[in-house]
Image (tube, grey):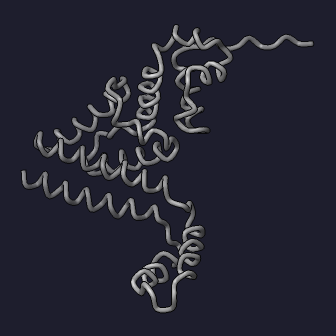
Amino acid sequence: MPAKPPRAPVTRDRALAAAVELADANGIGAVTMRRLAQALGVEAMSLYHHVSGKDDILDGMVDAVFAEVEIPADTDWRTAMAGRAHSMRAALARHPWALGLMETRSQPGPATLAHHEAVLRCLREAGFSLAATAHAFALLDAFIYGSAMQEAQLPFETGEQTQELAAEVMSTFPEGAYPYFQEFAIGHVMQPGYNFGDEFDFGLDLVLDGLARTAAAG
């Protein structure tokens, strides 16, 4: 019988990657020292050679998500912020558990700090005042995180599922009831090509338009 290949040694990076996989598959509640050790094939106590505890793991997981997000490029601020917004939205879709953690951790890692530094630099070098930069950062994150949370909780994923749900809901209405809802569902949601994700682009353009006016006003 051939010998089993040697197990890869546990490192901090391997432990954090395994924690992210656990959370992706089963939610953040699944990330415990015991389950993480099982996933890595080691005893729980041996993990403490690489992480100091559960909080250290959560901090590292958040940093791992930030590491996936596009750093604002050296281009005009609007293009950079739009690219960053779409990249953040995609990362949160891959890791929905991160929504509840992104703003709660008090020990930001290097990827998180590098990300924030790049956003601040982009806005300040584009001419945003310090106050306007703070407003822009908060507004963009509120829009991105709020949109990601809304999308994560919707009871549909595809345009077809959206249309089916709208039709099912309307089938329960008495005739003539809720005319504006029916107009919205039939005239918009149930039209070919409807995609709820398009609302993100529309909203992001409005946010960026407002920030552009703020920057121009000094």
Of residues 69 and 152, the one drawn nearer to the viewer in this rendering: 152
Q: Quadrant of the N terminus?
A: top right
Toward the right, the furthest residue is 1
Of residues 61 and 208, the one drawn nearer to the viewer in this rendering: 61
Residue 143: percent from the left, percent from the top? 32, 53
Number of callouts in the render? 0
Toward the bottom, the furthest residue is 176
Lateral position of residue 53 relative to residue 216, left or right: right
Toward the left, the furthest residue is 218
* In the image, residue 152 above or below residue 7: below
Residue 160: percent from the left, percent from the top? 59, 70
Q: Which residue lies at the image location 51% right of the left edge and 88% below the top edge?
A: 174
Of residues 210 and 126, the one drawn nearer to the viewer in this rendering: 210
Q: Which residue lies at the image location 49% right of the left edge and 40% below the top edge?
A: 97
Q: Which residue lies at the image location 47% right of the left edge and 29% below the top edge?
A: 61
Residue 60: percent from the left, percent from the top? 44, 24
* In the image, residue 121 above or below residue 193: above
